[in-house]
């Protein structure tokens, strides 16, 4: 037998968000003054009371296996959270805790997808969804959206993508990479469609706490008992509590599937980290003011980065209403040259910016969004100022189109 890599693994692309972040961190470690707008990771330390809870867990010897699907203590805390924040009533047996929301999504797709099943993914989309679907043998079907619609697909576009093989639809609100927030009406359309056609909804709510301009979060599962039975609510500790490294995510959903996910998980990772589970229960049950403090700071940074971008000729962006990303529209720059080198697309833009100005951004191609780059503003005001100064300098060095006048005056 040849010593080959399986077909399944040969075709999996590495996570570009993580790769760019690793590259930026490597450059920093080598002494370069890199500004990282790459990874979507809060720059705040995990709040002290959560760290203290972890220390307490260690001191109390919570260092053994827990039930594979998570401790009852944490499942109860999740049920309380879902009731308190979302008005959703779940039993602990409807909950599974996994090693980060990415792993929650992985396990959901493993549990619901058979080979050839199609999953609708609105684009621009987070890098991992298509690969997670493919890893389960499914087929990602992209549903395009437009910048003028805040990157939320229209009902016509969703309907056009449906086939008899459609098994599920992914909703990410607030969204990564665009920061778009689905309205209740838009969610209601998906809910009605899903109930009517018998589709699962995978509702990724990891950015639920990061909403701006007085908006509040609506989970599609809130829209009625029927849709709740077909929905997987995915959430986790990474973004709201600045706990990316702790690796705790969770899924609430229909009991039979959650049970199957538990069996699957019991043979793959076993339980998520025991100490992190205890600390997560304390985070969910405790004072939530740390979450609000971080949200306010993100909003301040969003306002600042959006103003800076829209003040530079040649690039622009929408004002996102949630998460901590902004989609930089670079369409006016594509096809032009920077110091003689052609910018053929978002990949070139990102790599030239990193090489020439030491600013890391993620090219839109990673999110099925050519013509854009994603900037994460989960970084300090000083870093945002420095990074935007460098981007302005880079853009000013891009040559005008042959025979044309550029930068355009967009006043
Ligand atoms: N969903 C979305 C939309 C994300 O941006 C992330 C960030 N990595 C995740 C899920 C996974 O988060 P984690 O695995 O850190 O809980
Ligand atoms: N979700 C973050 C991002 O999009 C973290 C990296 C990842 O898990 O892909 O940058």
Image (tube, rainbow, N blue to C red):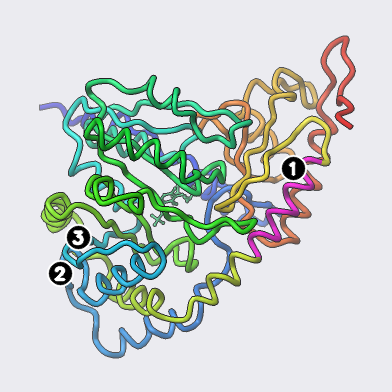
The secondary element bearing badge 1 is classed as helix
Residue 97 on image: x %, y % = 26, 62
- Sequence-wise, the earlier of marks 3 and 2 is 2
Type of secondary structure dominating the magenta stretch:
helix
Residue 85 vertical position relative to residue 283 in the rendered view, above or below: above
Q: Is residue 229 left or right of residue 313?
A: left
At x 12% / y 51%, what residue is drawn?
256
Residue 336 vertical position relative to residue 74 in the rendered view, above or below: above
Residue 159 on image: x %, y % = 38, 23
Numbered label attached to residue 94:
3
The secondary element bearing badge 3 is classed as helix
The magenta segment: 297-310
Rate crowding at label 1 as few (under 14), some (14 to 19) or many (20 or more) other CA atoms within 10 Å. Answer: some
Numbered label attached to residue 357:
1
At x 41% / y 76%, what residue is drawn?
283
Q: Is mark 2 within 8 Å of ligand 1?
A: no
Can residue 41 be seen here? The reply is: yes
Can residue 26 be seen here? The reply is: no
Residue 195 on image: x %, y % = 26, 37
Q: Are marks 1 and 2 in contact (CB under 8 Å)?
A: no
Q: CA distance from mark 1 to mark 3?
A: 49 Å
Q: Are marks 3 and 2 in contact (CB under 8 Å)?
A: no
């Amino acid at each position: 037998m040849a010593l080959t890599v399986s077909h399944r693994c040969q075709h999996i692309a590495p996570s570009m968000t993580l790769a760019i972040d690793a590259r930026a961190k490597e450059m920093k470690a080598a002494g370069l003054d890199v500004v990282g707008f790459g990874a979507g990771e809060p720059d705040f330390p995990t709040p002290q009371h959560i760290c203290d809870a972890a220390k307490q867990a260690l001191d109390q010897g919570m260092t053994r296996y827990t039930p594979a699907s998570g401790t009852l203590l944490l499942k109860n805390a999740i049920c309380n959270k879902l009731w308190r924040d979302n008005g959703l009533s779940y039993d602990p047996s409807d909950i599974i805790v996994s090693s980060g929301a990415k792993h929650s999504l992985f396990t959901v797709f493993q549990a619901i997808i058979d080979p050839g099943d199609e999953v609708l993914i609105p684009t621009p989309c987070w890098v991992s969804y298509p690969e997670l679907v493919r890893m389960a043998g499914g087929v990602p079907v992209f549903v395009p959206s437009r910048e003028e619609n805040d990157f939320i697909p229209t009902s016509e576009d969703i309907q056009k993508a449906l086939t008899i093989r459609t098994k599920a639809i992914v909703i990410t609100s607030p969204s990564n990479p665009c920061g778009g927030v689905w309205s209740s009406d838009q969610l209601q359309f998906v809910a009605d469609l899903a109930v009517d056609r018998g589709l699962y909804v995978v509702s990724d709510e990891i950015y639920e706490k990061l909403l701006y301009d007085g908006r509040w979060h609506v989970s599609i599962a809130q829209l009625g008992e029927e849709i709740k039975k077909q929905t997987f609510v995915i959430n986790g500790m990474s973004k709201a509590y600045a706990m990316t490294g702790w690796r705790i995510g969770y899924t609430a959903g229909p009991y039979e599937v959650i049970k199957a996910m538990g069996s699957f998980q019991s043979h793959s990772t076993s339980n998520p980290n025991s100490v992190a589970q205890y600390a997560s229960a304390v985070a969910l049950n405790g004072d939530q003011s740390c979450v609000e403090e971080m949200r306010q700071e993100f909003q301040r940074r969003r306002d600042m980065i959006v103003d800076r971008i829209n003040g530079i000729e040649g690039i622009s962006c929408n004002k996102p209403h949630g998460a901590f990303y902004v989609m930089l529209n670079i369409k006016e720059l594509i096809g032009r040259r920077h110091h003689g080198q052609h910018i053929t697309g978002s990949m070139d833009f990102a790599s030239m910016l990193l090489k020439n100005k030491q600013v890391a951004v993620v090219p839109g191609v990673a999110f099925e969004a050519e013509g854009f780059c994603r900037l994460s503003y989960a970084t300090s005001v000083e870093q945002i100022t420095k990074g935007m100064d460098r981007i302005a300098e880079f853009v000013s060095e891009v040559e005008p189109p042959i025979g044309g006048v550029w930068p355009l005056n967009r006043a």
